Image (cartoon, coloured by chain):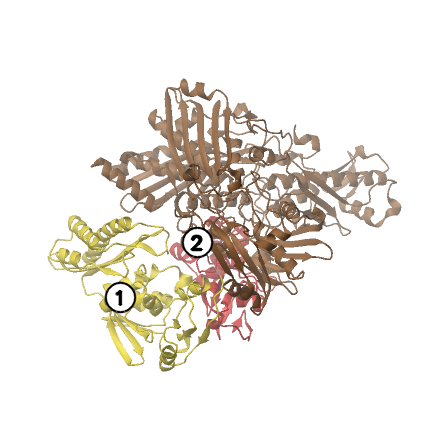
Chain colours: A yellow, B red, C brown
Amino acid sequence: MKPPVFDYAAPVSLAEATDLLVRHEGDAKVLSGGQSLVPLLNMRLARPAILVDLARIPDLDWVRADDETVAIGAMTRQRTVELSREVQARHPLLHAGLQLIAHPQNRNQGTVGGSLAHADPAAELPALALALDATFDAVGPGGARSVAAADFFLTYLTTALAPTEILTAVRFPTLARRTGWSIIEVARRHGDFALAGVVASVGLATDGAIDRARLVLFGVGATPVRAAAAEGLLVGQRAEAAVFARAGARAAGDLEEPLTDVHASADYRRDLARVLVGRALAEAAARARAA
Amino acid sequence: MTVNGERHEADVEPRTTLVDFLRGTLGLTGTHVGCEHGVCGACTVLWNGKAVRSCIMLAVQADGAELKTVEGLADGPTLHPIQRAFLEKHGLQCGFCTPGFMISVYELLSRTSTPTDEEITDTLGGHICRCTGYQSIVEAVHVAVEKMRTK
Amino acid sequence: MSERDTGIPTSVAELPNSEPRYVGRPIDRLEDPALLTGRTQFIDDLVLPRMLHCAILRSPHAHATIVSVDTSEAEKLPGVVAVVTGEDAKRWSNPVMTVPPGWGTHCLATDKARFVGEPVAAVAAVSRYVAEDALELIAVEYEPLPAVADARKALDVGSPLVFEQNGDNVMLRKLFTWGDVDGAFAGATHVVQREFRWNRLGANPLETFGVVSQWDELEGTLTCRGSFQAQHHFAMARAMVFNLPLNKVRFIAHPHGGSFGGKGGARGTDITALLSRKAGGRPVKWIEDRMEYLAGGASQAWDRHYDAAVALDAQGKVLGFRVRLLDDLGATAEGWGAVSAAKPLTSFTGCYAIPAAQYDLTIVATNKLPGSPYRGMGPPPHNWVLEQLMDLAARELALDPAEIRRRNFIPPDAFPYTIASGNEYDSGDYAAALETALAMADYPALRAEQARLRAEGRYLGIGLVNTIEPGVFDWNAYAIVGQPGTGVPEGATVGIDLFGKLTIKVGFALEGQGQYTVAAQVLADWFKVDIADVRVIALDTLAAPPHFGPGGSRLGVAITGAVLGAARRLTDKLVAVAAGLFRTTPEHVELRDGRIGVKGMPEASMPFQEVAQTMLARSDLLPPGVDPNPEATYVWTAPGRTPADDQGRAKSYLTAANACHLVLVEVDVETAQVHIRKYWIADDCGTRLNPANVEGQTQGGVAQGVGAALLEEAVYDEDGQLRTSTFMDYLLPTIYEVPMTEKRALCTPSPFTPLGAKGCGEGAMHTTPAAILCAINDALVPLGLELREVPASPQRLWTLLQQGKAARR
């Protein structure tokens, strides 16, 4: 298990990096933390001609949090965000989600941007980005642009980023007042990729009825999946078990065929999604009431 | 890079993993290779103060970094309190995974002198030990906390 | 026959020391300082001059004819020194010996590949990186053949044949009948019969196998350094493979990072030997990587289909026990996996006095990785079958699981007790272990809690399992699968140097169980010295006395016997010399508390070290005819072993430790997850030479048992492709899955062993899977469901729960 031969470049500016990507278009791979890429290199499943390491580019490693947004530079280590007191205080959902990513030893090296650009559909960060309507900032040969999360995840391990573009930052809006949240998943072991997972947020009106709901499922499709119809079922309803169960059934029913692999069949994943949606909504509603 | 306080300069092939560099080029064979795909934690080293898996990191990624390996824990013949604690609590059997465990515990205890049970579990959860069943390792961490507090 | 005949103490009180300080105490391990500082030299840490690195090309097909292998491009790659293929293997080596015989091949596939991961060619190059580059340049033309990956299909007429020349895929078929089984079942008031499926899993030590081989053409010798669990066994097999005299084969075992039976690396050893020969004698290192281990290493055991039944009378007394086992050993019998099907004979009827039993055993070949040994060596699935049937029988008779066990235990006054399948249990008190566990867990309160939560729709389950751990293995246990021999030797040489310090020389490398510490504890207490004055070192196969090393829960007992036997002999030498110095005869001289002196005359004594110094440096003072070497060797074998009869009956394993595990699980019936809530263990392995070592073995076994019950499975698809080739798919338990257990030790010493110790390395692995699976089924009782396939993965459990829902609709 040793990587094949490749070239390596550590550009010191975004311009230099995008130049390299343009020059080697199709044969270059961006290296950020390497937690997904290097195992693939070791197994010789990835065979880039050149790795473009973003580590020497300045100003990609930062966290800025205010009341509305937690903005994170793409090369910021997941663990840095997780341990940020600002993030813990202003964005407990993001904090909770980060803690579900593999193990501290991976989060110490893995970057926020790397996980998002890799876009594993069973990963937590893409689901969080979709649930929170995050905005992705990218730079390419044509300049900078921003992409909404809803437009970012195209399919399995594929994003709206062109091969010559580099993700530079992601901005996660914070949750509104009186909004409860939950992120739960079932994995074979703690830290493994989810067989199925759910990010939920629920806003309650003063009369206790649900006035906002957001549901994103992960591990059950080619991308994180927003359960829009189930969200629609919730709004205006009382926050109670029967309502959550209906939403779960709808969210699960609306899924396209989930993945079958050695750990879980499509049917089992779909059923897990149903159960987890119900549980996540109950937890989110309880948090909303306590908020 | 600086490893255990000693500066090293070397040209490496880009594809060389950090663990192969530490073991092969520098001869620091105390860091072990268990899976080479970032799951077992045997290869864990301290990279700029943080515990990382050196089998899924390229040596070039550690250019200029400050590293600590198991060889850097003891002070000459005097074991580090974490090592003493593992010894006293039989926190190892075959000992192959142990350097990685101790490096992660080192990171934990350099961040907090009073880790919670959850923090200890979170730290150890990234490592696989096939021998001990973890109980004696948890006990060793508690003893290490005590030793470092009274040091 | 007792150990008394050999002069080896059977209890701590018999040591020549009025205040033993080490035996029986949780002594810090001598092994640990080097391990904790990263100084222990594992095989991958070894660098030899001009050493090359090997990479192995493996078959991507489960079954395929090899039409051609073209290595010419690989040979041209700069840095490549040698390439070998099946042609080299045929020219320079023999097929490996197997158990049962006739199911083996060369180390590199010659005519065809028989499983995914089978070595086809190999490269020696200046680095592992370059060697792997070269593999990509080897062109192999395969003609795929139909594969068989299912044991039942392998029995079908017309199934693809793994070895055409054998006519079918049946490696071994035998019916063992012990007592009047038909009568027992005919006369029973209750018969409980079920099918069970245990899927493949395996050892997965954190260190894979590694070897450095060096072929010396001039001397005609082969030297191999590696992580060998049983170095002498490896050496013998290589002598046969390469037609070398055994004294031309030298094996040097390095400390290794765990084994659990799964440190097989015969093919890698042979391949590196071939490469070294081709590379002009340069040393060639091969470190098996994790994917090689999972696909082509000693990583898989116990692929079993069971159909089993117990027959009971109206009082819940078991009259008979029948087991039909279809055991899927994979493509060849090279990995000694067949012995795992034989080992259940050593404790076939568990803790119970069951007068009649039957074992209908079929071992079959398929196009999967050859099976290997794994901790416990076979009984863990068997114990699950028996214990689950006991639970089901209890349910049918409306008895508590504890009560049905009480009614069937072999009583404490019945020992030594010969079970129906022929092995003899040395001693034990099974009810005591059961009652201890019940009390620790407050069993009645636990049942009440379970009932209360069931009313809330929560499904808690209690597993309560008693098992035997047969300890101190003997070859005679494996006679039925074609393994010859009785007696497994373990030797030690004990010496005193000029400065009075002690050295123990043994024939096995560090593996993790702490046996060097045990050896030092025993010797330090024999001579009443500080344990720091004892050093233990490993010798290679040509230097060490006859040895086997760890395996079959034997080494703690065996090395204690070897060290004490050698200490006894050495003491006799010292006594002979001292008798001369004291001008008396040896029968009047003894060792007591570290001094050699005249019995009953404390003033006429001297430190034993002075006697040794006299032997080494004052020949002028020595009595004529004495041996002046203060060193002695003793080779211990288990006393009283008998060869197997035609039904496999033998006094095989010397000791029978026992344990009761009690576990509380919760099944989340919506997500199909199992959570272990609490775990209690009452464990009796006789005298505990180092209780901390024993506890570590127990807890480590629990962890592996959790893996077996819930996580670990080598999955093949129907074409024989492995779907669990990384640690992301083959799941080892982490701290999140393994319960912290509450343990209590009982002690029924063995009357047959040195110091009364019993084998203790495998007990928890024998017990934990059964306990957890019985607990899961206890939780499912209100749903009317039974899970009878392991591991209890969420997918498997979910499927069962869905079937239950459908049935209730």
Horizontal and vertical percent for residue C159?
Answer: 43, 40
Residue type at mark 2?
Answer: Ser
Secondary structure beneath disc 2?
loop
The secondary structure type at the circle numbered 1 is strand
Q: The C terminus of chain C appears in which quarter of the rendering?
A: top left
**Image check: B23 left or right of C679?**
right
The quarter of the displayed image where residue A148 is located: bottom left
Q: Is residue B24 left or right of residue A78?
A: right
Compared to C205, does C586 lie above or below?
Answer: above
Residue C254 visible in image: no
User: Residue C272 versus residue C638: which sits nearer the camera?
Assistant: C272
* In the foreground, C465 or C363: C363
Residue C790 % position (x, y): 39, 41
Dot 2 crowding, Cα within 10 Å, few <14, some 14–19, many 20+: some
Q: Can the viewer see residue C22 in this picture?
A: yes
Q: Quadrant of the N terminus of chain C?
A: top right
* Residue at the spot of label 2: C725
Chain letter of disc 2?
Answer: C
Q: Which residue in the structure is indicated by mark 1?
A: A154
Q: Amino acid at mark 1?
A: Leu
Check the image and report above or below for A82 versus C11.
below
In this rendering, the answer to whether B77 lies above or below C427 is below
